[in-house]
Image (spheres, helix red, strand yellow):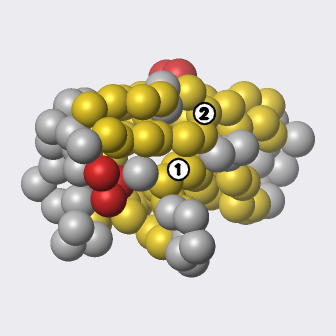
Amino acid sequence: QVQLVESGGGLVQAGGSLRLSCAASGSIFSISAMGWYRQAPGKQRELIATLTDGTTRYIDSVKGRFTISRDNAKNTVYVQMNSLKPEDTAVYYCNVRIVHISRATVDYWGQGIQVTVSS
């Protein structure tokens, strides 16, 4: 069993920064891929950033402002969000592909964390 715990969300003014963390714990052999999603009110959940095999990808609307990274020793994935805009307001979710000690591979979701950017 694996738990993902997100932290770091909150209220920030436009132009400000936040760093979200997603810490994984449990039966983990390794983390093979990770991503951050967000879901704004009335909209579908969208994938905003991924980190797989050392390669990062971002959607255009966050490119240059958001940075996804990981700390292998802590089994934690981060997203640094700079120059935040009101349109970044959403619930943010991490998604992590865990390779278990048994070598089974399973995707897990964080609980979601609110980010609100005021204008």
21 w.r.t. 89: above or below: above
Is residue 84 shown above or below 57? above
Report the residue at 88% width, 41% height from top. 1
Q: Is residue 115 something that shows in the picture?
A: yes
Q: Circle 2 sits on which residue?
A: 6
Question: Which residue is drawn at the image coordinates 77% and 36% (left, top)?
Answer: 3
Q: Residue at x 48, y 72 (%)?
A: 46
Q: Along the horizontal axis of the image, is 109 left or right of 46?
A: right
| Amino acid at the residue labelled 1 | Tyr
Is residue 13 or residue 38 the one in the foreground?
13
Whether residue 51 sits left or right of residue 105 in the image: it is left
Locate residue 119: give its quadrant: top left
Q: Amino acid at mark 2?
A: Glu
Instruction: Examine the rendered structure and indicate whether residue 43 appears above or below residue 107.
Output: below
Q: Secondary structure at mark 1?
A: strand
Distance between the Cα atoms at labels 2 and 1? 9 Å
Q: Position of residue 5 (x, y in %)?
A: 67, 32
> Residue 92, which numbered label?
1
Nearest the eye: 14 or 99: 14
The numbered mark, 2 or 1, whose residue comes first in the sequence reads 2
